[in-house]
Amino acid sequence: MSDIIRLLPDSVANQIAAGEVIQRPASVVKELVENALDAGATEIMIHVKDAGRTLIQITDNGCGMSPTDARMAFERHATSKITSANDLFNIRTMGFRGEALASIAAIADVELRTKKVEDEVGTFIHITGSEVITQEPVACSNGTSFQIKNLFYNVPARRKFLKGNTTELKHIISEIQRIAIPYPEIKISLFHNNAPVYELPKANHRKRIVDLFGKAINQSLVRVDEETSLVKVFGFVGQPRFARKTMGEQFFFVNGRFIRHGYFHKAVMQAYQQLLPADAFPAYFLFLETNPANIDINVHPTKTEIKFENEGDIWPIIHATVRESLGKNSVVPSIDFDQSGSIDIPLPPKSFSEIQFPEIRINPDYNPFDNEKPTTLGNYGKTSAERKNLGRWEDLYLGTQLKLKPEPDYEPSSVVDDLLFAGPPEQFSGKKTLQLKQKYILTPVKSGLMVIDQKRAHERILFEKFMEVLKSDSVASQQQLFPQTLELNPADSAILQNIIPELLSLGFDIRDFGKNTFIISGTPGVLDVTDAAVIVERLLEEYKTSPVDARAKAKEQIARSLSKASALDYGTELKQEEIIHLIDELFACVTPNFSPDGKRVLHIIPVTDIEKSFSK
Ligand code: ADP
Ligand code: MG
């Protein structure tokens, strides 16, 4: 029997390889734009016709190619970017496989014009189905221009598989975005059927994002910036209130390369956890920079998935830095505060015209976050973020009552200060409140009627207290008069054993007595506990129903479960002072508007809605 194994001709091998690299017009755009970047271009122009089916033309002002290189570039595994296997661990270019041009030339009609600065004339090459039709000198400008026509002309299956023009154009646009965002210093334009889609001038990151996604995104972007020995994380995250119901602008880049990374995505999403309803998607644009030796870009042919050597160490860095940035720009319901950021202080009524209000001096350097100065006005001991919310809380009332006069010994140093320390707690008692159905608290605010869910509000307050305690590890335990015994089934007992250390640091005095029995002899000082055993049982119940996905999350989980287990129930009648106290404490929270599990704590019925309902 004769031998039957043969080597495939190059053209066929290239066509097969092309199937992996080039799936649709957008893949061609991606490969060619990346090549232009690698060639050091500062300007890239892309023209497509019929979503790339008939023409993709990409022109750059990069380094260009010599006649020999121009011809070589179309060979499979021809690359100028790596020379040995070792280089694979130090990749700083977008391409390195030397497959793209060979693949494209196998399945389309390709024309290349290219010239190096130092050369007199350039090179023209025409290739179709891997076959060189023409190579000749040509007069052209410095840089490189590719024209790809009739994509997939010889792969009918592929051509049929293409979606409608709208979809294919969308793919092209998102490839352009993924390159334009990390390279704002490069001028990029995209035209479809001669109409401009993007004309992006050289810019910085923020400006580039705004140029791509519209002006409205600008005010939502919060800066992220963190550098550790392992990784640098910077970029922007969207404020929760701008989050949308559809998966929107979420981008990770590693060393300038767009990646998908489910695990890191989770780190970001968890940073939003109590700030967003579960079905909302925040925007983020995060750039990671790390030593190329720490990543393996090689795992996927289309290269959007990258493996990191230290994923487990990078996760908490991303999580913490995003969370911190969001915290700094917290997060009180925006509808009720002047969108422009200015604060409207009402004019005093006429009869007060003779009263001299203290002069307000504005200190432009004032930063409410790093100035922890104590005050005599009752906010002492709160963090600056808490004071900030208190200030905003006061602001809510600005339209409904006269501005309170500061104490004589207190001279406000800025408008912000003035609002932050707007008044001692007893002055809150001027607020009108009402409890509805032993479930909701109603109170008038500047823009309408605020409705607060009392249980969720209390959960939020307790949650932040517990988190504070857990962070500081300062135990404030209150001994029970009569220690209680708790007998559990083996499964619950195992869970409880696991979380005892955290419970101890929360102020529980709880000991394992063996045989699934526990003794509780102290409870957290912050809790008003009558039946400690019931609280612990409810805690276990909560703990079981919301799974913990990382050990780092255990504390938060416990704080969440505990706050839910011990918050005051619906049906609890509240006295006026208790209501005021609850409201004050709620607005001293960093995140007053969502409960620890992301549910809405308060809602404002706008005056305009009320007016509308009386319009007939
Ligand atoms: P890779 O990018 O993986 O090296 P490609 O097939 O995309 O492989 O390109 C092959 C080679 O052709 C590149 O290594 C580069 O030397 C050259 N090349 C491709 N596009 C350009 C360009 N726009 N300007 C200059 N050189 C280019
Ligand atoms: Mg390439």
Image (cartoon, helix red, strand yellow):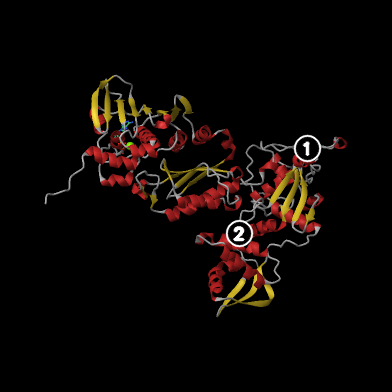
In which quadrant will I find the C terminus?
A: top right
Taking the spot 40% from the left edge, 38% from the top edge, the residue there is 162
The residue tagged 1 is 346
- Answer with left or right where residue 401 lies relative to residue 119: right
Q: Is residue 142 above or below residue 39?
A: above
Q: Which mark is residue 467?
A: 2
- Image x and y of residue 226, in percent: 49, 46
| Dot 1: element | loop
Q: Residues within 10 Å of mark 2 (few under 14, many from 20)?
A: some
Circle nearer the N terminus (1, 2): 1
* Residue 437 occupies quadrant: bottom right
Taking the spot 37% from the left edge, 44% from the top edge, the residue there is 303
- Image x and y of residue 292, in percent: 36, 46
Given residues 27 and 589, the one toward you in this image is 27
Quadrant location, ligand no. 2: top left
Q: Is residue 406 above or below residue 597?
A: above
- Image x and y of residue 498, in percent: 53, 69
* Res 190 seen here: yes
- Give, as a three-letter code, the residue at label 1: Pro
For ligand 2, tell me if the residue under mark 2 lies within 8 Å.
Answer: no
For ligand 1, tell me if the residue under mark 1 lies within 8 Å.
Answer: no
